[in-house]
């Protein structure tokens, strides 16, 4: 692992956070990083809802069976796509664009000393419906994921799941 890439290898899912709040400046920087991601034809169909209210985080957690720890996280970022803005009206591009933005948030958070965990929403119908109803989202807005973020209890340590067998050179 090349140490120049530590900001990538150090990004690990963090599910336990200290009580320390995440500053508005840090949150804005995460979203600045998100919106520096590539998107098809630069349509930038990503939209973000920042949630810090404890009761709202607790209620969102009830919609995410594998994200119970969000109830204790200082901040949740709901990443949504605008199907009305995406290139070619394509759901696939929307998901790819939002995923690029999500990964930028996770990497930026690592660089700022924050921990994050990507919580899947799309394509689980019941989670999409739950988040849509909770936030009363307009019909063109599709929730893609929730990111839990905060100051980590401890950083899990750097990692890669590098597998030479996953790589094909020149031909399959
Ligand atoms: C699309 C997607 C959905 C995920 N959903 C969850 C989730 O609901 N709960 C959770 O704890 N982690 C979730 N994760 C995080 C993965 O479990 C985690 O990235 C994976 O185990 C690898 O570990 P690492 O992030 O520490 O490298 C999700 C990751 C992705 C990309």
Image (tube, rainbow, N blue to C red):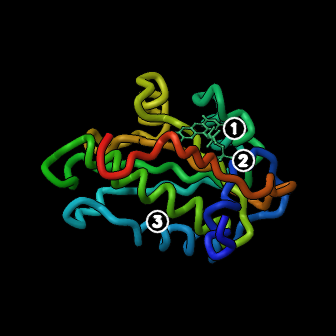
Q: Which mark is residue 37?
A: none
33 versus 64 height, above or below: below
Label 1 near ligand 1 (CB < 8 Å): no
Tell which residue pokes out farthest to the front in this image.
170
Q: Secondary structure at mark 2?
A: helix
Residue placed at 58% from the left, 40% from the top?
119
Q: Secondary structure at mark 3?
A: helix
Most foreground residue, 141 or 13: 13
Q: Which residue is mark 3?
A: 34
Spot occupied by residue 150 in the image (x, y as percentages of width and height):
73, 58
Most foreground residue, 82 or 12: 12
The quarter of the picture where the N terminus appears is bottom right
Tell me the quarter of the picture where residue 112 sits: bottom right
Q: CA distance from mark 1 to mark 2?
A: 6 Å
Q: Is residue 24 visible?
A: no
Contact between labelled residues 2 and 1, with CB atoms less than 8 Å apart: yes
The quarter of the picture where the C terminus appears is top left
Spot occupied by residue 37 in the image (x, y as percentages of width and height):
39, 66
Spot occupied by residue 8 in the image (x, y as percentages of width and height):
61, 63
34 versus 148 height, above or below: below
Classify 10 Å Cα crowding around label 3: few (below 14), some (14-19), many (20 and above): many
Q: Secondary structure at mark 1?
A: helix
Spot occupied by residue 117 in the image (x, y as percentages of width and height):
65, 48
């Amino acid at each position: 692992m090349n140490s120049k890439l530590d900001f990538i290898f150090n990004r690990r899912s963090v599910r336990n956070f200290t009580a320390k709040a995440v500053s508005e400046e840090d949150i804005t920087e995460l979203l600045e990083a998100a919106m520096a991601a590539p998107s098809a034809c630069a349509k930038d169909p990503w939209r973000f809802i920042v949630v810090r209210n404890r009761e709202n985080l607790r209620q969102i957690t009830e919609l995410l069976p594998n994200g119970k720890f969000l109830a204790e996280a200082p901040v949740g970022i709901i990443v949504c796509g605008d199907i009305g803005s995406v290139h070619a009206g394509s759901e696939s591009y929307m998901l790819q664009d939002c995923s690029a933005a999500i990964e930028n948030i996770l990497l930026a958070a690592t660089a700022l000393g924050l921990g994050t965990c990507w919580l899947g929403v799309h394509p689980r119908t019941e989670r999409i419906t739950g988040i849509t109803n909770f936030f009363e989202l307009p019909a063109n807005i599709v929730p893609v994921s929730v990111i839990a973020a905060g100051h980590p209890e401890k950083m899990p340590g750097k990692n890669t799941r590098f597998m030479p067998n996953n790589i094909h050179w020149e031909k399959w």
